[in-house]
Image (cartoon, coloured by chain):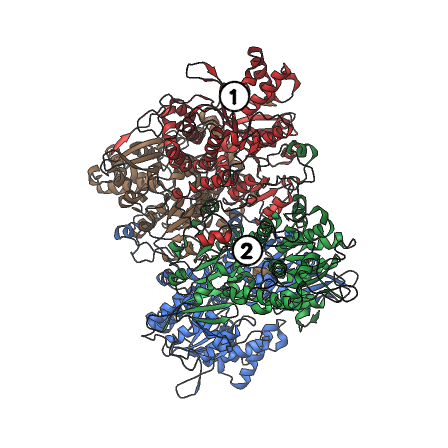
Chain colours: A brown, B blue, C green, D red
Amino acid sequence: MDYKVADLTLADFGRKEIELAEHEMPGLMAMRARYGADQPLQGARIAGSLHMTIQTAVLIETLTALGADVRWATCNIFSTQDHAAAAVVVGPKSAGGTVDNPQGTPVFAWKGETLAEYWDEAEKVFQFKDADGNAIGPNMILDDGGDITLLVHKGTEFEKAGAVPGQDSTDNEEYKEVLRVLARSLDNDPTYWTNIGAGIKGVTEETTTGVLRLYDRFKEGSLLFPAINVNDSVTKSKFDNKYGCRHSLIDGINRGTDVMIAGKTAVICGYGDVGKGSAESLRGQGARVIVTEIDPICALQAAMDGYEVKRLESVVEFADIFITTTGNFDIIRVEHFEKMKHQAIVGNIGHFDNEIDMAGLAKIPGIVKDEIKPQVHQWIFPASDGGQGKKIIVLSEGRLLNLGNATGHPSFVMSNSFTNQVLAQIEIFTKLDEYPIGVYVLPKHLDEEVARLHLDAIGVELTELNQAQADYLGVPVEGPYKSEHYRY
Amino acid sequence: MDYKVADLTLADFGRKEIELAEHEMPGLMAMRARYGADQPLQGARIAGSLHMTIQTAVLIETLTALGADVRWATCNIFSTQDHAAAAVVVGPKSAGGTVDNPQGTPVFAWKGETLAEYWDEAEKVFQFKDADGNAIGPNMILDDGGDITLLVHKGTEFEKAGAVPGQDSTDNEEYKEVLRVLARSLDNDPTYWTNIGAGIKGVTEETTTGVLRLYDRFKEGSLLFPAINVNDSVTKSKFDNKYGCRHSLIDGINRGTDVMIAGKTAVICGYGDVGKGSAESLRGQGARVIVTEIDPICALQAAMDGYEVKRLESVVEFADIFITTTGNFDIIRVEHFEKMKHQAIVGNIGHFDNEIDMAGLAKIPGIVKDEIKPQVHQWIFPASDGGQGKKIIVLSEGRLLNLGNATGHPSFVMSNSFTNQVLAQIEIFTKLDEYPIGVYVLPKHLDEEVARLHLDAIGVELTELNQAQADYLGVPVEGPYKSEHYRY
Amino acid sequence: MDYKVADLTLADFGRKEIELAEHEMPGLMAMRARYGADQPLQGARIAGSLHMTIQTAVLIETLTALGADVRWATCNIFSTQDHAAAAVVVGPKSAGGTVDNPQGTPVFAWKGETLAEYWDEAEKVFQFKDADGNAIGPNMILDDGGDITLLVHKGTEFEKAGAVPGQDSTDNEEYKEVLRVLARSLDNDPTYWTNIGAGIKGVTEETTTGVLRLYDRFKEGSLLFPAINVNDSVTKSKFDNKYGCRHSLIDGINRGTDVMIAGKTAVICGYGDVGKGSAESLRGQGARVIVTEIDPICALQAAMDGYEVKRLESVVEFADIFITTTGNFDIIRVEHFEKMKHQAIVGNIGHFDNEIDMAGLAKIPGIVKDEIKPQVHQWIFPASDGGQGKKIIVLSEGRLLNLGNATGHPSFVMSNSFTNQVLAQIEIFTKLDEYPIGVYVLPKHLDEEVARLHLDAIGVELTELNQAQADYLGVPVEGPYKSEHYRY
Amino acid sequence: MDYKVADLTLADFGRKEIELAEHEMPGLMAMRARYGADQPLQGARIAGSLHMTIQTAVLIETLTALGADVRWATCNIFSTQDHAAAAVVVGPKSAGGTVDNPQGTPVFAWKGETLAEYWDEAEKVFQFKDADGNAIGPNMILDDGGDITLLVHKGTEFEKAGAVPGQDSTDNEEYKEVLRVLARSLDNDPTYWTNIGAGIKGVTEETTTGVLRLYDRFKEGSLLFPAINVNDSVTKSKFDNKYGCRHSLIDGINRGTDVMIAGKTAVICGYGDVGKGSAESLRGQGARVIVTEIDPICALQAAMDGYEVKRLESVVEFADIFITTTGNFDIIRVEHFEKMKHQAIVGNIGHFDNEIDMAGLAKIPGIVKDEIKPQVHQWIFPASDGGQGKKIIVLSEGRLLNLGNATGHPSFVMSNSFTNQVLAQIEIFTKLDEYPIGVYVLPKHLDEEVARLHLDAIGVELTELNQAQADYLGVPVEGPYKSEHYRY
């Protein structure tokens, strides 16, 4: 036996983790194998914004392996894994690497950015160089939540208006930073974002939230370029959202709190795909799970799945764990915090931190926010005698706890989502004339293809239709097999 | 205590069961409460074809309570519950009844019809009388699988052609009966079905199979009237198919065989909604479940749900229970039967009996079909020495085992499906001009309404959006809440 | 294909079901294969009392195949399957039968006996003939619940006292019958039971309840012969009680009520082995399950398994299904019935009908017991206006619903219990001198053997210890592997 | 809001975690509340050896709160949480602390000790001072696995023999260190361990392994003092082993590898309590779980629970995850490693690292052990061409992965185990004359009491027997409720 001691740089550690993750991301590796020779993304300059994790590193290096030039920021101030970022910057140097990109890819992200830093870094993903070293913008966007798509659209809008609103025009701390960045850019170059926008062929968007913004822009006529809604590929929304959260919810709670979940009463706010995965995650550990819902269909599904369905008000006083998964805002409010038990645990796995009213919590008179460890705080309520009262534990400051307290979704499920991203990038970049401005989902045969690429790795044998059966169903032998409205 | 001895007629027993079922069908009861006074189906003459069970009885009496005149047949030769049929014929006589329909509703169905009887009875649901007692056809169809819709369309087609093909033009035993019935009618009245078709405002169809036929007809331009696809209401396909089968699959296996499911290896062919419910049904009883699939997305779902996914060929020799759920044909074939273990159990819960090649099974030289009890047969293979070899147990002759061996889906889940049917009947009957010929699904707000009507009965508290939250999501406070492509 | 029409006598139908069950009872078939030649029960005259089902038929015919002469009664007035009883009486006549017992075995049982009939029949299992046709008693007892063991002990006791107490000395309806039977016998032959008792080598007892009685008799010094406690073999109590009930609870509820279990709130009273299986049974169907418990350890187990644990009083008003599993009495009382919802379902799977206060229910002024179908009654409460109020559905009159409404535990799990019975009968009959009067459990190596005999049938591969591993653990390679106090 | 920045010393961080854990350990807190005033452990000098985690810190401080003087080492070189150790040394200083022990408790443990360091530190827990500051030994032992109990027994044995065997008398690396430490002590003081042993009243032992050693010593007559077997309290073995592992197995795998468990095939070797919890842990995350077993009863349980049961040889080539839970040795051997897939994950949760043949693995010619991060190694097999072949991931070097890769069992379940420890320490220390040399389990009423103390915290309502019911069962109203052989 030869013992190799682990005295690694951050980047070397990242490279090891990337190599392990590649094995778990068969869809992305298949993209490299299938398209590596053709280089369909040759000439693509992709501005990317998505949680800068190990899995994203494999995505980035798949895009570069297909010929793209890439710049990357994160879409969440807490979700960057620094060793992943470092490893992408270094790139897979050695001959043994699966991608030959000696110079690595620029990444503008670290764990624990301030909001100001976040938006400063977001702006940098638009800064490419052409072959002669001159500044040039991207021609593609890959986005998660729509933040960098927002920069282009708001920048263009304000340049047209000739002015950026003052920061005091908004109460939203984050939007103040957007205005600051755009004001600075307007000062610098009054057509900067207009030019950037004009150069972009399209965007591929990862999340429900980002997709909603895109549909809104398209409806109001302000969308600047076509978009592919990756979120609504079946192999994204029904896998990443559900099975990814089933994995990462308990992972985040465990790493954050080490609390036994068995025997606890847990409230899952929302029973969409994320809520379904979350409820199963906690039930699998022996929690009693209660669901809250606004949609009667999802509420009935929860009941059929054996969950109690109640309003938050009815259970807030005795439950132990509260998780928001709604995609909506103001779900857990001060009135709820006030009634919770001592050492209740509160977290969010539903995209934005405003599902939990963190601002309201911070404004409770006399409350103290006390850090136990990074991303785990106890909020100490004042007692009636002026001393310390009950403490409520909040994970990841109300942001995505699976990314803040753990490492996010595991590679295998992200391989599904990200293979959709790669296919969507190729689709727009290579067939732009088929995509007039609008919001699209990938055709079903590509969706099925993404799934197909993940079966061998887990030993699944797929049955093949014979021609008579295919005719009976009225579908091609090789698929696609289902109508567009099929719900899976 | 006063003891009432149960010495009931079939009809009285049926009436008791109907009363119990009414409590479990809050959606239908809400239809009666909401629309009973308005009588929106006044003037409707509904030809119905759907498994004649206790639940269907509550549906029929809801239709009559809303003003309709109804005739009913079953859509499956084994699925009729005779006490349900008898009770509907008698009608809820007493003052205590929830529907005032002293004369009852004509039903043309009994358990264990021959194929010839089946199609003779199907023809009868088109025979109404007007106020003067003259023969008149229906103006609405409510169908399950499309058999009576087929009569109208094929009848019309043959009348246009002036001739019905001979019975020997087909190998299909069932289609021979269709031709027989239509030939008889053509002899009798060469424009009978053409007139019937012209009088019909529309059809509401219950199943995937029937819906597929409707889309095909619409595509080829032969659809005679508008259709509402009830199957694809979320509150139908994601409830009836999944949760209904979770309930009724083990119920059918238990009543049919009394075999312990725990420890057994069960193969579920297909992982659509029916397959999902079926797999969960057997897993909940401690079976090891293996899934077969053709669609890579559904296959990946099965794997994520913890099931082994294999081709039937790989597992047919050691599995104990085989259930088809595909909606396709020729799934379990002679080559599979040949390899099965002694006392393997084979059944179908996926609509048509051709999922299992029953015809092929019967043609194996030397095989003996031996009835253990009604709907349970052992097929005795010849041994190499000419004696009895292995025996394979087939449930319900390959037809729907949950209806043949048990009582089908329970009332509560059928209340969802059937409330969709009632709403769809009202929709077409009262708003015909909004429905040019085509195939429609119910609008999402009605789908949500169906779910909403079932929540109180099981103690579900629904959360209400506030206006700010509704605005944030861009939906009305009262719904609908989801986009059309949302998959639940 | 050759079609054998099923126009069977009850006995022929029973024989077919027995043949199917034999395949599912590998432990009993292994007993026949292993001991058939040696005839270890040659000379045994076994008086048996145990639910007269198909599975029991296979037990009986295993005992006769090993040489025993057997008489059989049931231990529950509702649990007899008449076709099983008929088939055992006829015996496996044909050459193809697995047991050559042309004359069959006398059975004294039918479904729906009165209490008087029950005890009259119970007395008959003591009536054997010797080779010369003279009356003789049994030399072995196989009991379930201890009823026929009670006859011998009470008979002997009263004969010693010279008198049987009058029937009016007790309020217990059932005990009145015992006194009637014993008084009649005392009149007839004042040493009848004393002689019977003297002739018996031992008893093997199936249930917790019966075992408790035996330990009590042993403690007070009145036990007449040694007893083997079959109930506490691991392969009985941890299988039959748990996995048997998981199977048969929903089977009974489904056949009795056809009610959808998903979405319902179900209360399981007691979380012993029966309660554990029952809770899992309903959860597997999507019910929300609440447990009641008196034992803090079992209560904590229920909580760790994800169940809500409450007092019945706290949940009686909103739950839909109530199941008693305690082995105790007076669990569901009139005060609870009074608060239940309309159409609440109440049943017992915990041995005696006194878990539910049926007597108290019947005494509620104005209440009407109305039979829906055999073993399913609705108890109609009087409304305040004198009309009909809410109705509560009671299954199997408070007796074992899995036997009354369905067919009891499935063959495979009963094969475990019954193989213990056969081994216990052989043990006492052949090694009597090793068993002075007392209550014994089977040695662990026999318990393991029972399990081992059931593995092949379900495809289980057992790992074998190597000698070094066995030495490491300090156990023989071939077992037994665990200490006596190991809990499994 | 007042924001307290987290810039904590290790000890301060530990104190915060301890405070959180106290809330989750209601049994231990109840011990403090109930016995704090009486100080039943006043005068006890406890030598403790048990994983030095946050939960153990709460145990230690409960012992000191009851009057004991304590010294502590760990029982596993990797399991110490350094912040827990530091916090115990510091002690709960402030007035707000729940224990007033300003000087803290000496702890001799850190994460990642060498074997030599481990045994040097173990020796130190025997070094107390009396009131005058003179050296004195402990009078109680609290042990996990029996290592410090072994020191006393082997030391005494060798002192009696007058010599310690040379280190080269054994191949076992760990036992060499034991011999080294004892040889040094013999040089120093030839009656050191004899005196220590004479001063000890008794030991309370936590684990199966340690208990086995105690029974062996008792059988061979070498046990020096009475022992209480805490492991076999129901509230220990059926909770810690099962529910603790259900929690901590996936926690360890997740933190160690971030691999998606859903869709993977996992092999659990052994289906005792640890195996049962482990199988459920992985199934709850969507793995397909296969069990290996030597005991036919446990194998049958696994099958009834729906798991495939196979020999390791049959599945080693295609499974993804391998977990040993047996308590035996040499379960996963070189022959198995040779056949595993690339990136198979191997770990142990069954006490000793010899369940996996780590020594054999290291001896494979050409193999390289490469650290990915602490406690996670990939073993790189040589390829046939001399390059790198497949890599196998081994967690925690084959030691307990839930402690090495995660934080062990959560507080709530450990509160059960540790409340048993506290009761056992009190029992022996205060009632020594009731415990002649032997191995004992705690009486059932104490076992029930431990459970009872944990119910309120999770909202469990316990039902109370009435007197009639207690009489019916023949148990006291307040328990204990079950016979000694009841298996739960």
Q: Is residue C436 left or right of residue D151?
A: right
Amino acid on which disc 2 is placed = Cys
Mark 2 → mark 1, Cα distance in angstroms: 54 Å
SS under mark 1? helix
Residue B451 placement (x, y as % from top left): 38, 61
In the rendered image, which quarter is residue B392 located in? bottom right
Identify the residue under disc 1: D199
Amino acid on which disc 1 is placed = Gly
Identify the residue under disc 2: C245
Q: Which of the two residues, C76 or A304, is positioned nearer the viewer here?
A: C76
Q: Which of the two residues, A429 or B200, is positioned nearer the viewer here?
A: B200
> Residue shown at 44%/41% (left/top)?
A250
Q: Which of the two residues, D170 or C269, is positioned nearer the viewer here?
A: C269
Query: Vertical placement of C410 versus C234: above or below?
Result: below
> Residue shown at 39%/55% (left/top)?
C313
The chain identifier of the residue carrying mark 1 reads D
- Is label 2 or label 1 in front? 1
